[in-house]
Structure formats: C-alpha cells, structure tokens
Amino acid sequence: MIHVHEYKEFKYAPSSKYDPSYVDLERLVYLLDLPNVQYTEFKNKLTKSEISNFVKTKKPRVYFLNADLFSRYNPDDIFDISDSFPETLFVFFDHETTNFSSGLEPSNNCILIMNSFEDYKNTNSHTYNYYFLNSGLQGEYNNFMNELFRNTYPIKRTKKYNFFNGVHKPHRLACYELIKKNNLIDEGYFSYMDYTRSLGTENEKREISEFFGFNNDEYAKYISQFEIPYLCDTNEPDPNVYKAFLVPPQISLSSYIYISTETRFITRDAVSTSEKSYKGFLGFNIPLIFGQKKIYKYLNDMGFDMFDDFFDTTECVNDKEMFEQFDRNLKKIKEMSLQDIHLFYLDNFRRLENNFSGMVHSAQSQLETIRDICLKF
C-alpha cells in the first residue's frame, strides 16, 4: 500500500493536470498515477514520534509526506525516520524556501523534493527541485506557450524587459533603486507590486534599515519619498494576477529579457530557488536573475543557458560585488537599443527554445523516474 499524508497550509491545485498551478502533494501523486494509494489530508500536525509510530505500525511500502505535516520540523527529521525504516520508501515534499536541508545525504529509501540546498553539490539522484518540477509539469499550458512563441517570436517587441516584484524585501528595494538610477523604469514592464501594503512594520523597518545602513531619520525620509510603480495593464496589486508561477504571455512575449530577484538573498554557498528562477524559461525570455551568488552556476548545472555572452554571470564574492554586477548588466540593457536587442534575440531564439523544451522534458522525465522508483521499491 502507498500512503500519502499531507497537511495543507494552503490549497493550491485543482485535480486537472492541465491547469497551471502550484503542485501540492495531492496533485503530485495524481500526476504520478500510482496504484493502491490511500490519501489522507490532516487537519492537525503530527510529531516526529507520531509519524514514526505510523510507519512502524502500518509498514507502508511507499510513504509520501510533506514538511508541513511536522508540528516541529527539523530538516534532519526525515533522514532519521527513513534510516529507521529501510523497508519503506519515503518521498519527502517541501515546497517552501525557508528550510534548508543539512547534509543532503539521503539513503536509497528516501526521495527528496525540495528547493533549498546548503550545498547543492551533495544532491544525488534521489533529490529533485520542487519548483523546477512544478514549472515543468503544466500539461497543455506549456504546449500552448510553445505554439504561441513559434508563431510570434519574429515580431519586434515593445519593451526591453519585464521585472515583477512582490513582497517588500531589502534586496528588491536596492534593485528598484538601480533600475531608477539607470532610467529603465519606462523601458520595460517594471512593477513593484506592494501587496503587503506597508513598509512601516517594525520587522520591515529593521530589515531595510540594516540593509541600507539607515538611521531612524534616514529611514523615515526614504519611506516618505517611496513611490510604488504598478504594472501598466492591471490595477490589481498582486504579482499573481495571472498565475503565481508565470509571467502573463502578453508581457513575456512582448519583451525580451526576464529580470527577477529571488525570494531569498544569499551570499553564502547555498541555493534556494522559488518559481521566480524558472518563469523566464517558460516565457522564452533571456534570463537575468539576482539574489544569490551561486544561482547562475546552479541553473547552468541544471542545463539552462544563462546567456553568459550577453550578461556578466561570473560568480561574485560578496553582496557588494553582486550589486555591482547587477548594475553593470542593467547598464548594458540601457545602452542597447530595442533594435539591437531584437536582433540578438532573433539570432539566439533557438537557445530560448532549448531552455523551454529542456525544462519541460526534463521535468516530465524526472516525474517518470520518481514513479518508476515507487513502483519498483
């Protein structure tokens, strides 16, 4: 018997495999199309001991569970439990970006589906990136985007870039200031969508002040002058007005470059991807992703073309170098005419197709691999 235990903070996905949405554990099992599955959605979280006792008593052949199921989640818990029950295959699912796995050395009876890695070099064949899988498993939507791109890519586009920002974070504010400094607001689809509605909470004040080195008066002056630019074609202050993990095709296919700030700003040797790392590949845009010094190497190792011949993607040492590099890349966007970017885009559209198709096919292949492991265990 295959048991699936899930505690849901939010309900993301419908049952249809063709509707683009976040993939939760219920939908993942639906996509895997496994036999003899007993799914249980828990209303209350469980302790590590309660989860261990269930496995000890029921002896499931395959056991799916998510990080939210734990009342007190420690990244090492799943390793401890799986090591204690080698006859059960554990498929552990964590879609959030807040928890890092320490060590990442799962045994052969443990599959990890997550997105944050302290040292991604330690990942093995039983470790999969959640947001990569999520973005690649969108059924007919990906077919629709592929066909739309093939029929529209030669058309000259109206904007150089698209750059969506949601929840206020200090590194996003810093990027916003660089966009303004380079006079690029009006040359792209830029949006700082303030759906937190406030920069005045004590936590935000502390984070922003520490990041920029503001004293109380400097912080107050900055906030009093802060203007939030909204996307020109919507009044909704929400970056998910289309779909949470997608840039609307009318935006991505009428701009050339996808700029994104990752959720977590990290300067150590770690990677934590969200859907923001993959939106540009699904939108057939040239990627420029900021926020983690290892992000380019990580995505390049995954097989993505990061356009090293267009942007400076060399690995930085610290946050100062990261912002200087981002500023240089923005200057290049500013200095190139729309026509110059258009010609480069036309000369390299096959590389964009390869990023898109590589993601879609690899995600499907990984899903099939996970299914095979579950069936054979």
Image (cartoon, rainbow, N blue to C red):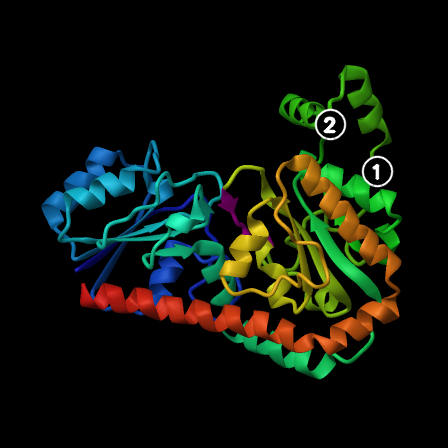
Query: Would you place residue 232 above or below residue 285 in this image?
Result: above
Q: Which residue is mark 2?
A: 212
Q: Nearer the viewer, residue 109 or 340?
A: 340
Examine the structure image and report whether residue 271 is included in the region drawn in magenta. yes
Neighbourhood count class around disc 2 (C-alpha, 10 Å): few under 14, some 14–19, many 20 upward:
some
Query: Would you place residue 148 above or below residue 158 in this image?
Result: below
Q: Earlier in the sequence, mark 2 or mark 1?
A: 2
Neighbourhood count class around disc 1 (C-alpha, 10 Å): few under 14, some 14–19, many 20 upward:
few
What SS does tag 1 mark? loop
- Position of residue 228 measured from the top left corner of the image (x, y, whole percent): 80, 41
- The residue lying at 68 percent from left, 66 percent from top is 285
In the visual, does 53 lie left or right of 101?
A: left
Label 2 vs label 1: CA separation? 17 Å
- Position of residue 44 measured from the top left corner of the image (x, y, whole percent): 32, 37
Tell me which amino acid carries mark 2: Phe
Span shown in magenta: 270-276
Q: Which residue is mark 1?
A: 227
- The residue lying at 12 percent from left, 51 percent from top is 59
- Position of residue 169 measured from the top left corner of the image (x, y, whole percent): 66, 36
- The residue lying at 64 percent from left, 78 percent from top is 350
- Position of residue 286 measured from the top left corner of the image (x, y, whole percent): 69, 64
Q: Is residue 235 visible?
A: no
